[in-house]
Structure formats: C-alpha cells, structure tokens
Image (spheres, rainbow, N blue to C red):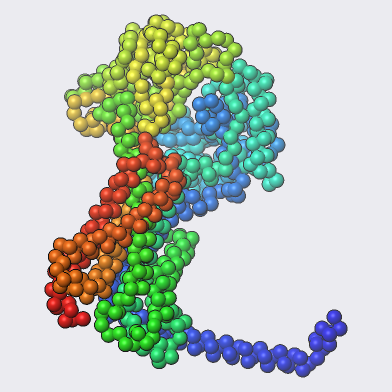
Amino acid sequence: MSIVHELLENKSFYSLCERSYHRLRRLISREGAGLMTTMLSDVRSAVKAWWSRPAFVLSALLSLGLGIGANTAIFSVVHGVLLEPLPFRDPQQLFMIHSRHPSTDRYPFQLPEFCDHRDGNSTLAAMAAYAGWNASLTGERDAERLLGVRASGNLFEMLGVTAALGRALVPADDAPGADRVVVLSHGLWARRFGSDPGVVGGSINLNAESYTVVGILPAGFQLSPRDTDAVVALRPDSDPWRHNRDSTSFLRVLGRAKPDAGREAIQADLDAIARRLQQQFPSSYARKAGVLVVPWGQELVRDVAPVLWVLQSAVALLLLITCANMASLLLVRVAAQRREIAVRRALGASPGQIIRRQVIEGLLLALAGGAAGLLITAWSVPALLAMAPPTLPRPDPIGLRPGVLVFTAAIALAAGLLSAALPAWRAARGDLRQDLATAGRSHGHGREAARLRSIIVAGEVALLAVLLTGAMLLYRSFGEASRVAPGFDAEALTVRLSLPRGRYGDIGKMTSFYRELHSRVAALPGVTLVAAVNHVPLNGALATADYRTADMQAGSDSRLPTANYRMVTPHYFRAMGIPLVAGRAFRDEDDADAPSVAIISRTLAHRSYQGRDPVGERILVNDTPEGFRPLEIVGVAGDVKHDSLEADAAPHLFVPYAQTHSQLLVWLAATQHLVVRAGVEPLSLEPAIRRALREVDADVAASQVMTTGAYLEASLAPRRFSLTLMGLFALVATLMAAIGLHVVVSSTVAWRTREMAVRMALGARPEQIRALVLLQGMRLAAAGLAAGLAVSLAGSRLMRGLLFGVTVADPAAHAAAVVVLAGVVLAACDGPARRAARVPPVDSLRAD
C-alpha cells in the first residue's frame, strides 16, 4: 500500500502516464485510419468488381434476398406472436387458470366455483373472470350480432388497460343494482358509429335492453383470438347462479400473481381450494380434478407456437442452403482469380489481407441481400397474414419492428460470413509458385477446389432432403385430414342467429319465432329443407352435458361420461346430411307437451350400451341446474366431427328444439343456427333470408352466413397454411440446390475436359461420357441424401405434433423426397453432361 501512495504522490509518474496515453492514442488513431483506408479501398474494389460481373451480382442478390427475406418474414410473425410481450402491465405475472375435468384439462369454471377461488386464495393479487356474451345491437340500422364478453369489473384494472375514450369497466360496475354499462371495442366504434366521440355517455340497445356506453377500448385489444366487440359487467356476486352448485361451467379465469408467488405456489394454493370444495360438495364437484395454471402468454399461442417454430426452422435451413450456394459460387470465382490473387500476394499482400478482401465482398453482398430481403418481407408479410388461419393470435404486432430489423441485420452478417469464410480461406492458402505459373483453365480449377465445392453441394443436398421430407410429411398429413369423413354434408347454408333474451323467455315464444321463420325461408325458390340447431359442427363452441344410463350404479358421479349437447328441429338430420342408423327422427309432435325424447350418436350408443339396441331405453341427462332428467331414446344418428377433423368423434346427444328446458333458453336465444338445404347456390340465398328474418323480427341479428363446407375449410386452414409455406420454402431451396449442383458439375466438367477428351479419343462414346458426368452428380448427391434423410428422420420428431395419419418415418413421404431429389439432380447435371458429350476431343486436346 505504501508503494501505491508514493506513486500517487509522484508528479513524474503522472507525467509518464500522460505521455504514454497520448502516444497510445496517436498510435491507435494512425493504425485505425490506415485500417479504415484499407477497408474503404477493399469496399471500392468490391463494388468496382460488381460492375464487371452484373449477372453474378444479380443472382447473388436474388438468392440472398430470398433467403434473408423468407427468414425475416417468418420471424416477424414469430416475433409478433410468440416473443413480443403482451400489451398489459407486468404480463409475466398474468396466468390463465383452468378447471380440470375428465374431458379436458382446460374446462371452464362455475360461477360459485370462481367466487370461492377468488375469495379463498392467498397467492393472487387479483382474479377476474369473463365469458362469451352474444348480443343483438339494435337501433336505427339493421340488427347486428356482437361478439361480446361479460367480464369482472376488475378485469381492466388487473390488466392495466385504460380506455382510449371514456373509461373501462371498474369494480363498482359489479355491485348489485349498478347501472347497466358497456365498453365498446375500437373496431365496433369506428364501424358502426363512425368514430363519433359523442357515443360515450349515450345509450345503445343490446338484447332489447338499454346500456350506457362508458368508454371505447384501445385499438387491438384482445382477450382471445376472436374479436371482442363489447364488454359488460359480469356481476358474479348478484348473479342468480351465485350459490347454485349445479349450474353451468362457462367462465374463463385470469389471475395476477403476487410479487412473491410463482406458478407452482399458485397451482398448489388453488388445488387446495378445489379439494376443499370437492369434500364440501361431493355431488357437484365429483368430476373436477383441481386446476391448471398456465402463463397467459403461453396459453394464447399454445396452438400456433409449434407451427411457427417449425416454419422458422425451415427458413433457417433455406438460408443455410443459400449460404452454401453462395460459397460454391464464390469458390468458382476464387478459382478463376487464382493468378490475380497470386500476383497480389507476390507484391506483398498478406494472407490476412486476402481473407479480409474476400470477407468484405461477401459481407457487402449479404448486406445488399439483406436490403433486398427487407423489400421482400414488406411485400410478403401482408400476404402471410392473408394466408394465416383466423385463429392466429395477436396479428397487430406483426411487421418490420425494431427487433425484426436487428434480426435481419444479424442474419445478413451471419450469411455474409458463412458464404465468404471458406472461399476466403481457400484464396489465402494457394500455392504461390503454381498459381503464378498457371495460365490454363484446366489447372485453374484444381482438384482441391472441386473437392470443397463437392462437399458444399453435398451439404446443400442434405439440407434440401430435410426440407423436402418435412414438406412431404405435411402434404401427407393434409391429405389424410382432407379425407376424414366429417359425418355431414358440405352443401348446407348456416346462419347464426341471436335473439333478444328479454322477449324470448319461454319455449312457446321461441318455437313460434322459429315456425314463422321456417315457413318464410322454406317458401324461397330452391329451398328444400330448413332446420335449426344451437351449434353446427366444427364451429368451435363448447356445449356439453353429463349423462348416465338408467342401469348405471349410483355413487359413480366422478366417472360420468359427457356428450356434446344439441337442441335441434325435426329436419336437422336431413338438412345436414347426417344419417339415422336406427330408430326415427324427431317429429313436430315432439313438443313441450309430449314425453321427453332424445337421439344419440353411434359413438355414444357403442360406449354406453355396448352392442345393445338403445332405442326405447332411457338416458338420464344433467342439462339443467335441477340435475338429471330422464329422456327416452328414439333414434341413433351417425357420428359427427365437432372439435376437429383429426379428433375422434365425440358422443353426441340431441334433444328436440321444442322440448328445450326453460333453464337453457338463455343459451338458445344467445346462439342458434338456421340450417338451409337448397338446390341453388347456398350463399345466393343470404339476401332473401335476411329479408325474411327482418319480416319476422327486425331485432334478431344474423351473422356468420356460411356453408358447412366453409367450416370444413376453416378446420383445415392451419394445415393448409403450414403446408403452403413449407412447400414454398422447399421449392425455393430446390432451385438453390439445383443451381449449386449445376455450377459444381459444370466446373468439374471444365476441369476434366482433357480427361474426357482422352477417353473419347480412346473410343468412349458420347452417351458413355454423358453417363459418367451424370453418375458423378448422382454420387455427389447420394452422400448428401443419405445424411439428409438421417437428419430428417431425427429432426422430423419435432413435427410430430403437426402430423396426422402418418408417422415421422412415413415411407411414402421419404420415398417422395428421394424421387424429387433424384429428379433435381438429374435436371441439374444433364446440361453439363450433354455439353461434355458434344465437345470434339481433338479441339479439347488442342485447346489445352
């Protein structure tokens, strides 16, 4: 320490340090300026060289632009959907909370069940619930069906969301006796009200009831992938079902963790509450198996994340193929410039300077390709969003954002380094004496350079094999899914209806409305059948009921089966093309005064009656808060796909529309579908159906006018999206690999010109020379193909969740990839092979 003090007090020491500092600064400045001058000279030389090789530069920019642009476009989707934080306060503290049920781990909550978890937990700072709420907006214009939400008054406060105009819901809106208020989405405000600020504070009619508009939500606000047009207060504590332990489960629940609570602690806390409820109310919660706590950000992207990561991996392979292609082209250029490079080395250029110049040229090409890639991205992102399935969450953050631009710059630099590294190394290590003496073409393309290019192209083929195999697996899966029989015809027209609940509170009024609408629509030209149902197949809605057979032993409520629950009119099965395999269809006589009846699906009959004829049997259905009620089975219908085409057909239970229990009318009024079968183009009937609907009740809103075939298409949309993109990437990669292979084989043919001339002079026929070149190309591709198939077999396991009806080792997919690759190799090698066979041997020997 004394030495340190002496140095600090010594002025000469300070003087020495100051002089050393200034010398070091001048040295760095001088060296830096020299390096900068040299690098600028290399840049000017590279740009000047571009003008003499426009074809090479354009092909390089196109290749790199496609590779970088494809990566940037997909990453913009990955970044916006998967990586961009949710637009809420402290989003990492938000969790989606599900009730676990034997049918699914993501089951909704009952109203009293939610209140018990909300009031009894110790790990959540706040807990809110919401549920779909379909409302008819009526007024001066035609009735419009809104995709609304009933939400806890604390939801927006918990999320940290403020209204764009006015205010959002507040906890006071949940209080008993509070005024009916509504918050409108930004989209509805602009579409229906022309962005008029005067709407806030005014009133609108929803389901024939007056609501005060208190605010407008910010643009882009979403609780789920579907749009939210309006939000009203849930009022859980004053709801009539607040203390009904046998009420319907319909609530989705969000929670905000306390600062010191993690996911495991929340899970344990809420599971303890669920166990306590099960002990306290065994008959009501026998089938509940605790809760599932999932970070909300993960929950929103659960279905699309695997697809997006697979696509991002695919474009990464495409970029690697592009880089390999560029490296191969640059190696050809280096081989052609070996004499020029040797002269520079003889004049004093060091290997480092040679490498630097090659790397700078590669980086400049990559940066220019990155700029072209951004232009391609700007064009392709809107096309991607247009192709994307409607379930893609959070589309608003997708675009050229700062994070995406940084990613583009990074992959452009990486592509430049990968493309230039091997050619630069090859340029710096040539034999100076031999290169200076080389003047002929044959020696200019040395054996070692050809070997390097062959290794690169074999790597391209391997990467291409992985891409092609993935594309073929997706193609096979799409074909298998397309061939699945949905159980219904695709020609029916469906119209979703939303009735004002206040005016349709009893089954008599409901059936009167339907009969009048039925008579008007059935009279339209071309219409053959008209029916109604609460939910059409594949519409994504959840409407289920527990059931048990009459001989099922008591005390087994925890193992009760569940069926999709449908309320249908007599002609529903014929209108949808669903066959009846036993018994009879519903009749007009099956009304509220007749005995309660039901039709079950084939799967339900097989599972619960095990070969017995169920027609005439009784089935007990828990479809009301009062508990189970008996129904007589009068028929068995064919199975219908509802959740998805890939899932097994779930059991279905159908009850007559006219026998809908009074407790279920609130759900039937909110959502029911008119089904129309006609001998004309279905969608051409829309104006006439809307006109007939206005004549019956102008306050009934119609929406989602679409054919049953459109539901089938929507079910296949995610597979079509991933298949289209993977196929496009595989096509571009195929072109890249074909170009690379063509260049390598052409350069090899040029290097072996003398050898082939000697062969032909000794009697080899042209077709033998052609076969020799083709065999060389096939041998080159075979090594890459073998490696690629091995990698694809291991890597395709990552795609397992995207496959249907095929395995990762599907022989047809792998065989198709091999056939395509063989065709690509033959096409790429055929041109050089033909040229080699046409060269006169005397001319070749004389030229050499």
Q: Nearer the viewer, residue 151 or 44?
A: 44
| Residue 574 x/y as whole percent | 27, 19
Q: Is residue 796 above or below residue 248?
A: below
Q: Is residue 294 above or below residue 78?
A: above
Report whether 351 appears left or right of 437.
Answer: right
Q: Nearer the viewer, residue 451 or 738?
A: 451
| Residue 715 x/y as whole percent | 36, 36
Q: At 35% from the left edge and 11% from the top edge, which residue is drawn?
A: 635
Q: Quadrant of the C terminus?
A: bottom left
Q: At 37% from the left edge and 65% from the top edge, which residue is drawn?
A: 455
| Residue 138 x/y as whole percent | 39, 32
Residue 690 shows in this picture: no
Report whether 535 appears left or right of 774.
Answer: right
Q: Nearer the viewer, residue 94 or 789?
A: 789
- Residue 539: image quadrant is top left
Q: At 45% from the left edge and 25% from the top edge, which residue is drawn?
A: 543
